[in-house]
Image (cartoon, helix red, strand yellow):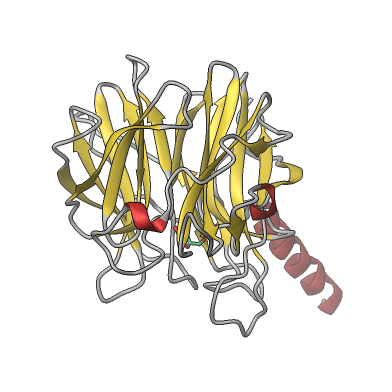
Amino acid sequence: MKKLLTIAITVIIGSATALAQNPIIKHVFTADPSPIVHKGTLYLYTGHDTASVTATNYKMPDWHVFSTTDMKNWKDHGVLLSPHTFSWATGDAYAAQCIERDGKFYWFVSTFHKKDSVSGGGAAIGVAVSDKPTGPFKDAIGKALVVNEMTTDKKHSWDDIDPTVMIDDDGQAYMYWGNGSCKWVKLKKNMIEIDGGINVVSIKNFIEGPWIYKRKGWYYLVYASVGTKPEMIEYCMAKSPTGPWEYKGIIQENVPNSFTTHPGIIDYKGKSYFFYHNGTLPTGGSYRRSICVDYMYYNEDGTIQKIIQTTEGVKPVK
Ligand code: FUB
């Protein structure tokens, strides 16, 4: 009888584990997901948490890439970029987003600037470029695209983080970013120069981690928000990439065991996916986060339904 019970428990635990896709990356701590689809493969660009269990701040040495063709099996392409790639950079590898244009892959990253004649330090945005989604990546400019001194609306030195980029149907590229305030610029066709001035837009409850995209005629600005609680994900919609942005509400409540969460959104093989991170791996936490994925559903009018966070994750696709 005891033996039978042991077998039954093993089978139940075994099947629960087999069903538990989330977090999708389990062998390293990952954060700040950024998906793209290229030639039928979904590539996921991520940050990498390496802080100790007792740490009270981030330790993020590099950025990784993973890929899948079935939303179940993830290939680890390893460390494909780090702040060391940028001669002007120092410090952590914060949130980033990779986007393709004319056969080149531009990886917009947030990291920190050395104190030198260009900047007194603080967060900065750089761009790496490659001919392939999995590198090799090199510094596309040889200097930062945005340094702390270029934005003055916020006094803290880490307000220039979390770049998100979209290319509109007319070929115009836009970059949004920010911590504490949401800023945006137009990018030139070469993707490595700002075209015009920096704009600051007032977005309700915005704190950081913007993700901009266009879908079925609507522009979406999805972002991490903060009140008195840990971060949630809220969003706005607009009929133009520069707004006016209409606030639409919360799509993701707090995530377990992590102060931050961070959206990465994509349609792939007929389904819509919402990538985010939480702190649920064993020994995980706010500085040891892990990327998860769940389904995203849109209403007829384009508004987004609340994300249901699951441990099962999403089903495999062909
Ligand atoms: O991962 C470091 C920072 O935490 C990111 O830049 C933010 O979006 C938050 O996720």
Quadrant assignment, res 3 = bottom right
Residue farthest to the front?
A: 117
How many discs mark residues in the rendered view?
Answer: 0
Quadrant assignment, res 301 = top left
Residue farthest to the right?
A: 3
Q: Which residue is found at the position 28% from the left and 47% from the top?
A: 183
Answer above or below: position of 135 versus 312: above
In the rendered image, is residue 145 in sight? yes
Locate residue 235, reporting x and y percent.
26, 47
Answer above or below: position of 57 versus 122: below
Q: Which residue is nearer to you in this view: 247 or 272?
A: 247
Q: Which residue is found at the position 41% from the left and 35% from the top?
A: 165
Answer above or below: position of 39 versus 71: above
Q: Which residue is found at the position 50% from the left and 58% from the top?
A: 117
- Classify the position of the N terminus by image quarter: bottom right
In the rendered image, is residue 253 in sight? no
Locate residue 39, reporting x and y percent.
62, 18
Q: Which residue is nearer to you in this view: 90 or 298?
A: 90
Quadrant assignment, res 106 = top right
Left or right: residue 170 compared with residue 12: left
Answer above or below: position of 196 versus 65: above
Locate residue 140, reporting x and y percent.
59, 34
- Classify the position of the C terminus by image quarter: top right
Locate residue 286, reporting x and y percent.
52, 72
